[in-house]
Image (tube, grey):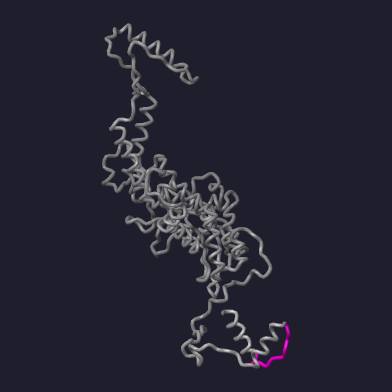
Amino acid sequence: MFGEFGNSYGVDHLSDGWQRHLSPAGRERNLIVAAIRNAYAYSLASSGLEHIRVEDDGGITVLQDSSVSRCLRYPNEYQTQMDFVSLIVSSLIYHGNAYSYAKRNGRFEITELHPLPPHKHRAVAAEDGNLFYDASAEWEYMTRQNIDALVPSRDVLHVKLATHRSLLWGETPIADSAYAIGLNNAISHGTLAFHSNMNRPSGVLSTDLTLTPTQMQDLRGAFDEQARGFRQGKVPILGGGMKWQPMGITASDSQVLETYNMTVLDLCRLFRVPPQLLGIDHIGNGSSTEALINQWRATGLLFYAEIIERSLERLFDLPRNEEIRFDLNNLARADFAAQIEALSKGVQNAIYSPNEARRKVGLPAVPFGESPRIQAQNVRLEDAKPAPSYASAPSAGKETSPSAREQDKLDKLDDNDDPALDDDTAKAVAIAMIEKAMK
């Protein structure tokens, strides 16, 4: 159990936990919570953090060689960016808080980020209002670092979830799902104990005859002897009116299974994860993979990405036109057909240039592919000219016939001659040729 100040307590000998503001934090391992944790951690860790600058024209430039990018790429000497992000997400899921101590160089740039254990309440408010953090750590590597016990908040990355109990301490959603997790664990443990003890046989032998205890013992031994060969494909033969009746799932077992599925749905609902993304296909409505990912990204994944991004931007003290972002578009890599279709539409509508679209799928640039392109018939409304009205033409409703001179020149054109025509005559001849071809 966790108290409101982050201290942990055992639950075996506490009967007044509700009076101490204690709430279960799901310390016991649970398969569904672990699957949810993995879904968030794997997705965000594989998305990648980028340091970007928003240009004056609205374009985005990725700053790959900045000190921020170098620190995010390798936060410390024992973690990669994927390890670092996975640990942050796991700490948020299980504890509601994630801490890291920032080391700086002589230019006051952050060069290393060292994670701190998340189960401890580390924020301390001084009398003058300044905020400090306890940077002491129980991990072996961190104990060898020269870190003061209290460091100012500018040197600590603190990512926290919301809670009504404290502004300086986050609370995990697991605290609100204590009953669902407890019931889920109880059903899992009961099922494990049931199958381990083999409290129920797979079937029974029945007959209408009255058997003595000796006969029952002999029949049991005979059936066990035949059962040894079941795995080799041998067929058992029952005599004396014996019938084999397999035992199926009872109504009570079905109710337990339904209750288990309800706890799974409660956990997925709390963490905003579609059950299908956890490999649970028999729960929830059927949808395409793209629709499920978009739903999850909008309702749950984007929230965790945003709080980590904003916390990192505050730690690095970035200017207003610079940001740290997860590239959540990497989630579309699993649906390559949808990605290609989206890029194709982007190129056709001049959103991407051909080379920009090629770079998103890892292809090299091609000559003349840097400029966006669009079809010629797409013009501005103010540049569009109305088509001439046929009714306003002077010869409306009348068939135009070429003059004798024009007809003579038209005949010469039919004979593959090339007479010299003035502009007016050439236009008249062209019109006559079109009308002649349409008849």
Q: Main secondary structure of the magenta part?
A: loop
**Left or right of residue 3: residue 58:** right
Q: Front-most of 124 and 257?
A: 257
Q: Is residue 316 magenta?
A: no
Would you say 379 lies left or right of 276 here? right
Q: Quadrant of residue 106?
A: bottom right
Q: Nearer the viewer, residue 34 or 343?
A: 343
Q: Looking at the image, which residue is at 58% across and 65% down?
A: 62
**Would you place residue 221 above or below residue 160 in this image?**
above
Where residue 168 appears, as percent x and y from the top left, is 39, 57
Image x and y of residue 246, in percent: 35, 23
What stretch of residues is rendered in magenta? 416-425
Residue at left 62%, top 66%? 355
The spot of residue 344 in percent (x, y) is: 56, 63
Give x and y (percent) for residue 115. 51, 51
Question: Along the horizontal axis of the image, is 101 left or right of 364?
Answer: left
Indicate whether 214 appears above or below 134: above
Quadrant where the C terminus is found in the figure: bottom right
Examine the structure image and report whether residue 417 is included in the region drawn in magenta.
yes
| 123 sits left or right of 52 in the view | left
Q: Quadrant of the N terminus?
A: top left
Front residue of this view, candidates 371 and 325: 371
Marker count (numbered): 0
Q: In front here: 130 or 309?
A: 309
